[in-house]
Every structure is written in C-alpha cells, then in structure tokens.
Amino acid sequence: MRITNKKSLTGDHNWIHKYDAKERGSPFEDAIAHGLLTLSFTPTMLYEVIMRNFNALPLKQMKSTVNYGYDKIRFISPVLVNNSIRGKFEIKSVLKNDNQNSIRIIWQITIETKHRDSEEIKQAAIVENVALINYKSFKPPK
C-alpha cells in the first residue's frame, strides 16, 4: 500500500502533514501521513491475510467477522508521504466468547514503512486489534 497525503480525510491540518513540511523544517524529514490514516489500513491488510490463508484457517464455517476495536496502539516512526507500508500479523490469543458460536482473536499487528528513496524499512506502529468471528456452527478442535 502506498501512503499519499490525505490530511483532508482526517481533519488534521497540522503543517507536518502538508507538502511544504520539508521546507518549513519538519523534524520528520518531509510531510508525514497522519497516524490514524496509517492505522485505517489495518482492516484491509487483515482481510487480505485471512483470505490468503482461508484454507489453512477454520474459516469455511465463518458467518461474519467484526472489527471489535484496538487495545493498544503505539506509533513508533512516522510514515513519510509516498512511502509504502505493509503489515505483519501474529495471533496473540484466541478466546471463546459467551456466545456459543463466537470467538475473539487478538492480533498483534506491526505496520512497517519502506522509505521511498533509500528503501530502508522501519516499524511505524504496533497495534493490538480485537476481532470477533461468528460461526454458523462452532466445533472446537479435539
């Protein structure tokens, strides 16, 4: 995914998000994407991970999935405008919900940014995302 300057989407008009940020002496080298804009890509990246591993995960009986929210969010490094980002996903825990056919998955997501010129890769954010998965019928593994 490529980040471009979408400050108007977030409503944050801080000068560090504007194209002339470098000329104005940005402490981040250039204009940066808003952290919440970067975070907003996590549901799409997570969906891509799930669909890529659809046959390896017990998803064929899945009825729906819901983004339940975020427990922890830390912005480690800025994402410069026109840098690319990617996500690395690790399942931190899987818990059975009170609902008989539902589980809660806590994902640790590491968002990395790749510098547009040097191609250096840095951690941009570390996030704990909580997803609820509802099944048509849930049969726990033996």
Image (tube, grey):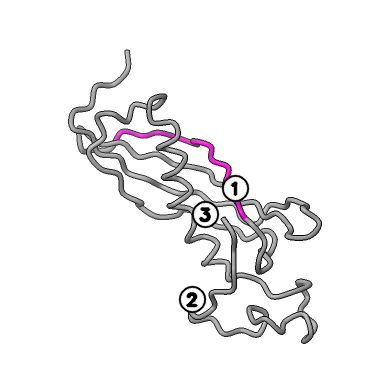
Which residue appears farthest toward the top when viewing the image?
Answer: 142
| Above or below, 116 relative to 110 | below
Residue at x 45%, y 43% (from the top left corner): 48
Looking at the image, residue 119 lies above or below residue 135: below
Residue segment shown in magenta: 85-96
Label 1 belongs to which residue? Answer: 110
**Mark seen at residue 10:** 2
Q: Please state which of residues 94 and 84 is positioned toward the viewer in this rendering.
A: 84
Marks 3 and 2, Cα distance to the nearest angstrom? 20 Å
* Residue type pointed to by label 3: Lys
Q: Residues within 10 Å of mark 1 (few under 14, many from 20)?
A: many
- Residue 14, located in which quarter of the rendered image? bottom right
Q: Position of residue 118 (x, y in %)?
A: 81, 56
* SS under mark 2: helix
The disc at residue 56 is none
Which kind of residue does numbered mark 1 sit on? Thr
State the CA–CA distance, disc 2 to disc 1: 22 Å
Picture coordinates of residue 128, whole percent (x, y): 50, 49
Compared across the picture, whether 141 is left or right of 37 comes to left
Residue pictured at 58% horizontal, 42% vertical: 88
Query: Pointer 3: what residue?
Result: 72
Local secondary structure at mark 3: strand
Q: Quadrant of the C terminus?
A: top left
Query: Looking at the image, is mark 2 or mark 1 earlier in the sequence?
Result: 2
Viewer-nearest of labels 1 and 3?
1
